[in-house]
Image (cartoon, coloured by chain):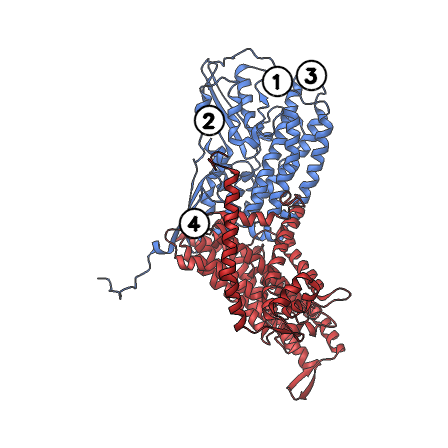
Chain colours: A red, B blue
Amino acid sequence: MSVIAPKFRLGYLIKGITDNIFWIIILVTLIAIPVVQIVLIYIDFPIIDGEIWNPFRVLDAMTHPERALPLVKSFMQTDLFKVVAFPGFGFAALIAAAVIFVERKMLAKLQLRVGPFYCGKVEGILQLMGDGLKLISKEIIIPAKADKPLFWAAPVLFAATAAAFVALIPVAPGWVVADIDLGLLAVFAVIGFFPIITIVSAWSANSKFPFIGGIRALFQMVSFEIPLILSLLGIVMLTGTLNLSEIVESQASFPWIIFMPIGAIVFFICILAELERIPFDLPEAETELTGGFHTEYSGMKFGVFQAAEFGAVLITSALISTLFLKGWEGPFLPSHVWFLLKLFFFAFIFIWIRATLPRLRIDQIMAYAWKFLLPLSLINIFVVAAEILLLGEQITDSSGVRMDLTAGDMWIMAGINVVVAIVAVIGLSKITGMDAKESTKVASATRIIEGT
Amino acid sequence: MSQKLPPGLQLEKVDDRIMTLNVGPQHPGSGHMRIILKVDGDYIVHCDPDPGYVHRGEEKMAEYRNYITNIPHLERPVIHDSCNILYPYCLGVEELLGLEVPERAKYIRVIAAELNRCVYTQYWLGIYGIFLGHSTMFMWPVGDRELLIDLLDKMTGARVTHAYFVPGGIRNDVPANFEDVCLRQVNYFEKRLKEYADVFYDNPILISRTKDTGILSREDAIKLGTTGSVLRASGVDFDIRKKEPYDVYEELDFQTHVLKEGDSYARSKIPWLDMLESCRIIRDALQKMPKSGSVRIKLKPNPKGGDTEVYRRVESGRGSLGMHIVSQNKPQPYRLKISVGSFRNLIAMPHLLTGEKLGNLPPVYWSLNYWPVEADR
């Protein structure tokens, strides 16, 4: 006490408070109120439901909250609300935090431990907040020979790209930030940014382990993007649209996962690889590369990377459920509840895989992408195209020539596709032989290098 | 005269292709050591392990302490396998002083040593799991290890640094209900070990990752002087418990496991098979153990060894662990030389890693059953 305020008197404290109040009153009456009056003269008041919303109406609404309802309703229709709050970033950030919490608790349950427990009294629910505070308060260390502008820009770009994804996902009928006709193409465009940002972050750190991690990430992401895009072409051919909301509406009777099992499998595996989740987490394999391209990042820059990665997990889970599992549609429950349920279902599958599988090696991953997933997705495209050509009826109308399929045709298609999926997966794994043979080849190659 | 190249364009030299990586000592995949790697693209062309960061001069320290006071510090190199590292010391000192250990103490020593081997191997297995990115295989062994540690805590009074073996027996007898508790926990542990096979050893990704990587042939394994699980994974049936049985190992019913492949997968599977075998040994020893009797011979203060030297070795979690004690008629040993399995297995590391892919570093390195602190002594 004596150290902080050596001459503490209650009288001084009271005098200080009254002085402050005096000056606040003087400044408000002499400056703030005239400025507000002058501004109010020049702006137009908004008209909602035929009523002019002047400042007195706002004060009135503050005393009677039910009178503010029209204002709130009209605000919910604006683009600002969509971007900031509900289908946009606020909602996504909330769900991403929930995904992180669910992942930590669920993984802990699978591994026979309890996970976060003490922070926030109830099952460690505030642990994420504590971790965030810790990361914010930590020092940000920048390597001496780093490319500083790029080193600062990389995490921000990463987070911004993940956030741009959010705008494209339809959460409920009509609830989407950017309802564009080329939605699926925009998704591919946004995914294409991730390898560039990763290599930028790895290169700018000017360190060896991040460099190797960045090169690995580049290889992996570029290889898996091709089957990722090809696996979705079947849906585009069947629905004839790239708009994500229309793709959801086209699954009103049955989800596409029944009609295109190969596409769903390939897309799910490619998403795992794009997100660098186990078993594809080589770019940040900590026992080989000390964390890959985020080795040199510390403090909140690392936190931003992590948050963006979890945001990407959430968004890609949403994307799978939108494309293959009817998106928001479902019986009994409201549409956004169904959307969240499906999202968390896929997030749980991500966690489950993380708890079950070890990490692969980079040559195995590349062989897997090019020898296994790419032929599978091509088979999917050709089979679906042939079925449309053989089963469909040609219809010519104002929008042009298109093929129309009846419900019976669709069921025939589903039967053929399931059989083709089983045959193709088993056959391809036999042909490519991703087991002992492959690695003996690698071993013989290493002996040659050893000799040189 | 070499052809003059345009400015900015140079012929590629070998040194430009090769990047040197310092894996360790501050690296999550190194342990308390440094591995200097030279990589050409994704291939390791040169590997130079650099141990010595945790050298503490155990051998020199032993020369200034009495035979009894050497016990607590000698177990420090492997605190999670402390019974096994004290075993050859106690056997050697008993031979020096001419002590005959009571029968009950011999059985309790075997039980403690086998429990401790499981504790060590569980720790090793957890790290092997996290090295391969399998976080469940990190958490499960480390969690199940707690049960065995609790058991050893009941038995010896300390969780990891037991200092339980003394020349002439064991420090104290086991508690009254020990046999039931031990049997229950060992049975549960054996059940859990079989679950590890489902999630880890039979995992197709693990098999494709570690099969045919870092192959150590039978001839190389013998020539390089490897020991323990590394030697047995290369097809050599060598186990000190069978070849030079100490205490009561010849009366117990067990077998050693040998695999012929010599790759990382075989090297990682042998310790798991050994743990299953340890459970059998413990059950057998509990059955054959005398139910009562003395567990320790009373020594006179500061016993003096004769003017002679002894070498005794045991099978530890990492292979043969020998101690050579030179005595010169004093209460202290004149010289104590420790031969550890970790260092002998490390010698095989450059041989195995040269020519491998960088991604094979963790499975090959950790499958060598190497504990850096023990290797430095």
Image side of residue B160 versus residue A146, left or right: right
Which class describes the residues within 10 Å of circle 4: few (<14), some (14-19), or many (20+)?
few
Q: Nearer the viewer, mark 4 or mark 2?
A: 4
Placement of A340 over or under A388, stated as above or below? above
Q: Chain of mark 4?
A: A
Q: Residue at x 67, y 88 (%)?
A: A396
Tag 1 and tag 2, C-beta contact below 8 Å? no
Kind of residue sitting beneath label 3: Gly
Q: Which residue is mark 1?
A: B101
Q: Secondary structure at mark 2?
A: helix
**Residue A255 picture location, percent across and down:** 71, 69
Mark 2 — residue?
A: B58
Residue named by callout 4: A141
Q: Classify residue A323 by image quadrant.
A: bottom right
Q: Position of residue B134 (x, y in %)?
A: 59, 48
Query: Is the residue A136 above or below the residue A37 in the image?
Result: above
Q: Amino acid at mark 4?
A: Ile
Q: Residue at x 51, y 67 (%)?
A: A192
Residue mark closest to the camera, 1 vs 2: 2
Residue A407 position, x and y percent, is: 75, 77
Q: Which residue is drawn at the image coordinates 53% and 72% (left, top)? A: A41
Residue at the farthest left position: B1
User: Which kind of residue does numbered mark 1 sit on?
Assistant: Val
Residue reaching furthest to the right: A332
Secondary element at image label 4: loop
- Quarter of the figure with residue B154: top right
